[in-house]
Image (cartoon, rainbow, N blue to C red):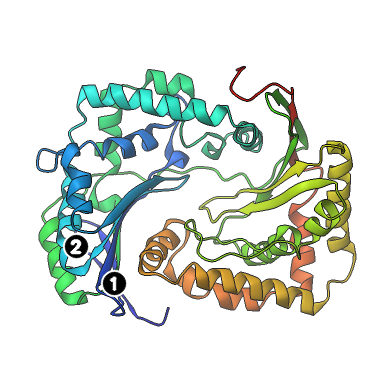
């Protein structure tokens, strides 16, 4: 984290973040676009994810059939992800082969083909992916809970989109979406590894400087600060396991409450890494909900989920119910544990242990070059890189009163969604 970051912005708006790390002859190269499901409208849900898939179908210079071969034969790895707030593409390569990745990404920012046959083929792939998700009880439950957690905000929509929209979207829709959002003014590049920043800036200039940005008017999306009323969702389906998922509002990552919320999550359900690629791991057996639910045979497992997002999202607690228990009993025990945090004094050593665990996971998630390049871009999607570099300091400043304040403010049972999956004892896959 001590290595300085070089930042520059080209005249066309492309922002570049470079971090030299000379510990190994490796470079990780990421291209980030400020487009995800947050920016989609009803009728076009899932279009950003579908465009991401199409980016692997090739350009005239780099046909899709050659792309993977080109990266893998040089000893590289690559992938892409579409999320709520962003879409990103990355390659981690031997340092002397990084030009291949840079040229490929520059070309597909502007020149992806969107062949009609590939569009039709990928529609089938994505619909199959969606069907697979709908056969998983936890994923079905999560889809319903997230949708119920928002009135109007596009976070209510799945990144993969609805079946109706996936059947409706056509080749022109995809191409227009690509042309609107894939350009230098809506992108930034992050790189970490074994390079000279001055040389790398010259290379990036040669690839992008003469490419114009497109006019993209800022899109205002009204945040939803609270879940306005309590809601309960019952879903039944195949299987023999009962699940409960409870969603509370969570603040945007750049909100002052977010750091204390992170420690609250650690106390309740165990430490979790904000890094989407993990890195390291630790048990949640010291968490309050593990002790009060799992150790007392009310639940088989409990875990929490807090994400760093541009707008307020949700904090999820997901519980696998013990076969001999009822969901209502487990939910009551969970509420009692939250009440203890709000109404009883939290000892400072407990907070310090939670902070220590969070620090450790944060360090593990930062240990390789790919993750360091990831954080350069990821933090810019909801705040800025300074958010990342000051994250540990903010955690260290958390006091017991901050935890109680956040718990009382956000974990109100009158402002949450409770989802319950009731198994019908039928084997998964035999019924819709």
- Residue 345 x, y percent position in the rendering: 88, 71
User: If the image is split into quadrants, where does the C terminus sit?
Assistant: top right
Locate residue 183 relative to residue 256 in the image: left or right: left
- Residue 401 x, y percent position in the rendering: 79, 71
Q: In this view of the protein, which residue sits in the foreground, 297 or 81?
A: 297
Disc 2 + disc 1, Cβ < 8 Å: yes
Q: Label 1: few (<14), some or many (≥20) within 10 Å?
A: many
- Residue 257 x, y percent position in the rendering: 65, 63
Above or below: residue 358 compared with residue 412: below
Pointer 1 residue? 193
Q: Residue at x 34, y 44 (%)?
A: 217
Q: Is mark 1 on a helix, strand or loop?
A: strand
Extreme-front residue of the structure: 427
Q: Could you tell which of marks 2 and 1 lies nearer the N-terminus?
A: 2
Above or below: residue 17 compared with residue 393: above
Q: Residue at x 75, y 59 (%)?
A: 268
Locate residue 298 relative to residue 271 in the image: left or right: right
Q: In which quarter of the image is residue 413?
A: top right
Above or below: residue 98 compared with residue 39: below
Say the numbered circle drawn on residue 98. 2
Separation (CA) of disc 2 from disc 1: 10 Å
Q: Quadrant of residue 228?
A: top right
Q: In this view of the protein, which residue sits in the foreground, 303 or 116?
A: 303
Q: In this view of the protein, which residue sits in the foreground, 40 or 108?
A: 108
- Residue 269 x, y percent position in the rendering: 72, 57
Whether residue 111 can be seen here: no
Locate residue 405 relative to residue 237 in the image: left or right: right
Extreme-bottom residue of the structure: 2
Q: What element carries label 2?
A: helix
């Amino acid at each position: 984290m001590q290595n300085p970051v070089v930042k520059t912005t080209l005249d066309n708006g492309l922002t570049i973040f470079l971090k030299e790390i000379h510990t190994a002859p490796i470079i990780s190269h990421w291209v980030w676009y400020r487009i995800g499901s947050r920016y989609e409208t009803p009728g076009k849900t899932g279009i950003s994810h579908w465009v991401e898939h199409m980016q692997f179908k090739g350009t005239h210079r780099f046909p899709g059939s050659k792309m993977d071969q080109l990266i893998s034969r040089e000893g590289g790895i690559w992938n892409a992800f579409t999320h709520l707030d962003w879409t990103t593409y990355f390659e981690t390569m031997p340092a002397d082969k990084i030009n291949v990745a840079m040229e490929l990404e520059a070309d597909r920012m502007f020149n992806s083909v969107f062949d009609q046959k590939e569009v039709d083929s990928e529609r089938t792939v994505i619909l199959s992916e969606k069907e697979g998700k709908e056969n998983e009880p936890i994923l079905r439950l999560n889809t319903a809970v997230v949708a119920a957690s928002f009135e109007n905000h596009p976070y209510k929509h799945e990144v993969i989109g609805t079946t109706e929209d996936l059947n409706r979207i056509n080749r022109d829709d995809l191409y227009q979406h690509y042309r609107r959002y894939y350009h230098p003014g809506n992108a930034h590049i992050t790189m970490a590894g074994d390079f000279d920043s001055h040389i790398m800036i010259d290379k990036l200039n040669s690839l992008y400087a003469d490419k114009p940005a497109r006019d993209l008017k800022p899109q205002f999306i009204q945040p939803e600060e609270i879940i306005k009323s309590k809601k309960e969702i019952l879903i039944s389906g195949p299987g023999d396991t009962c699940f409960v998922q409870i969603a509370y509002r969570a603040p945007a990552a750049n909100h002052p409450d977010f750091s204390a919320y992170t420690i609250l999550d650690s106390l309740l359900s165990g430490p979790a890494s904000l890094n989407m690629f993990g890195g390291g791991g630790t048990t949640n057996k010291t968490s309050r909900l593990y002790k009060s639910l799992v150790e007392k045979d009310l639940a088989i497992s409990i875990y929490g989920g807090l994400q760093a997002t541009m707008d307020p999202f949700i904090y999820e607690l997901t519980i696998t119910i013990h076969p001999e228990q009822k969901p209502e009993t487990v939910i009551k025990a969970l509420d009692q544990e939250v009440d203890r945090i709000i109404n009883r004094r939290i000892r400072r050593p407990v907070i310090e242990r939670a902070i220590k665990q969070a620090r450790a996971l944060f360090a593990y998630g930062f240990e390789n070059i790919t993750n360091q390049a990831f954080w350069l871009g990821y933090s810019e999607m909801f705040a800025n890189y300074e958010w990342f570099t000051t994250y540990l300091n903010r955690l260290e400043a958390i006091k017991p009163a901050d935890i109680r304040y956040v718990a009382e403010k956000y974990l109100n049972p009158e402002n949450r969604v409770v989802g319950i999956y009731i198994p019908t004892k039928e084997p998964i896959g035999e019924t819709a």
